Image (spheres, rainbow, N blue to C red):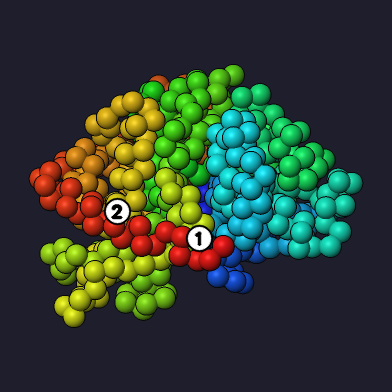
Amino acid sequence: MQYILALDQGTTSSRAIVFNREGRIVAAAQQEFEQILPHPGHVEHDPEAIWESVLATAKEALSKAKLSAEDIAAIGVTNQRETVVLWERATGRPVANAVVWQSRASAAICEQMKANALEPMIREKTGLVIDPYFSGTKVRYLFDHHDGLQERAELGEVLFGTVDSFLIWRLTGGRRHVTDYSNASRTLLFNIHTLDWDDELLGVLGVPRAMLPEVLPSSHVYGETDPSLFGAKIPVAGIAGDQQAATFGQACFEVGSAKNTYGTGCFLLLNTGEEPVVSRNNLLTTIGWGIDGKITYCLEGSVFIAGAVVQWLRDGLKLIKSSSEVERLAASVADSDGVYVVPAFVGLGAPHWDPFARGAILGITRGTTAGHLARAAVESMAYQSRDLIEAMEKDAGIQLKLLKVDGGAAINNELMQFQADLLDANVLRPVVSETTALGAAYLAGLAVGYWQDLGDVSRNWALEREFAPQMNAEERDRRCRGWRRAVQRALHWEEQ
């Protein structure tokens, strides 16, 4: 019996998971790596630490499952999306730290682009807004801060990639420089209508085409692993950015189906079918996946700080010793007692798109305890997600009846119940919560015939628990009014 290995390279850790034909986890391994914070609002990673953690967890997962390379039908890769890695073609060595999707390092570049009235053109071609979140401005930032780097890139000596590209370059021993449609659509350099890198966009940011990866479908045999890594070659056959992978893993194949991932950030995607929907409410139009010659588009809302607020409670405020303790601390109080935490540590994403917002705690009194702070921090994930869904419903002209959820924080029952209450909609949590890795596994397995079609994927989806709304409308409106007031105080805090 063969299996699929999924490599899930996230913002704070790397995971490797072995899945069987039923889409169930056989073995898993996880490893955190360092977050490099050189300046306020700047976030970096060491690409070598990323690679080492991916390789170590892949080997550990295979060892736990007592499997060898011959037992693996294919590898799927999913990744933190807009994070930028630049490396030397000749050696494979990174030329700088990776600039992480959360980083606001390129905020000044974005402000200049807005001043040059480029937003309408960029929005039309890419489906994105001008924001430091996306990859293209990060490449420009690296060029501006490393002498001679742009010239080397123009000569083809330095390659660009999102994390998937870097990993596949390493996995294949430098033989394949590729990405998929979903990751390419997050760069500000890719035209989501022509499905190609766009010369006008490349010109705006001064990014040479010579450094860009080949863009291929999300389910496709890209190459094989170097035999030295796992003892034999394994096909690498699936790629998707983490949020698109989670949407695929949740079997959101019908137009109008949606999922929300509660990870480091919160990411809500709604399947809009084979035609891109232009957002009028500050959401993103993005490519979900390319498979079987068809492109599936999604509307997306991105929250930058979700589960990361729990890390802040742990590492910054020292209120808890481990992230798992937050549920108990938050449950020590009946509610947040009017306290709101707006976790705009690196600005706010959709629907505000304010890189100059900063975090705020509002409503503190003498009676405020660590429990209230913890509860307000956890609830901020649900409030931010509600903001996204309100915008999405306006764009798509629908009312969401149910929401599939996944990600680390989705195991928090209090949070999922609060989310159902705020949305006045049912929240569905699947048996397999590692849907990001599962989506990458499905894409890889479909490419090699391990699974036959999307029907196989849909049949594997199983409900673990459903949360139905219990809050009355008056209470819901009161709490949401308080949240909106709190957000207003966090906006435009940092001077530009």
Determine if residue 200 is in view.
Answer: yes
Up-down: is 167 above or below 496?
above
Please rate how many residues cluster around mark 2, counting C-alpha atoms within 10 Å: few if below 14, some from 14 to 19, many from 20. some
- The residue at 34%/51% (across/down) is 384
Determine if residue 222 is in view.
Answer: no
Please rate how many residues cluster around mark 1, counting C-alpha atoms within 10 Å: few if below 14, some from 14 to 19, many from 20. many
Q: Mark 1 or mark 2, which has the lower sequence index? A: 1
Image spot of residue 112 (x, y percent): 66, 51
Looking at the picture, tell me which residue is in the foreground, 374 or 206.
Answer: 206
- The residue at 36%/43% (across/down) is 388
Looking at numbered disc 2 in the image, what kind of residue is underneath it?
Answer: Arg
Looking at the picture, tell me which residue is in the foreground, 52 or 282.
Answer: 282
Q: Quadrant of residue 179?
A: top right
Looking at the picture, tell me which residue is in the foreground, 385 or 438.
Answer: 385
Image spot of residue 58 (x, y percent): 56, 53
Image spot of residue 346 (x, y percent): 49, 61
Is residue 436 rendered to the left or right of residue 221?
left
Up-down: is 324 above or below 294?
below
* Mark 1 element type: loop
| Mark 1 and mark 2 residues within 8 Å of each other at the beta carbon | no
Q: Quadrant of residue 273?
A: top left
The residue singled out by tag 2 in the image is: 484
Looking at numbered disc 1 in the image, what kind of residue is underneath it?
Answer: Phe
Image spot of residue 274 (x, y percent): 50, 20
Q: How many marks?
A: 2
- The residue at 59%/53% (across/down) is 132
Label 1, label 2: how many angstroms apart (C-alpha)?
17 Å
Q: Which mark is residue 481?
A: none
* Mark 2 element type: helix
The residue singled out by tag 1 in the image is: 356
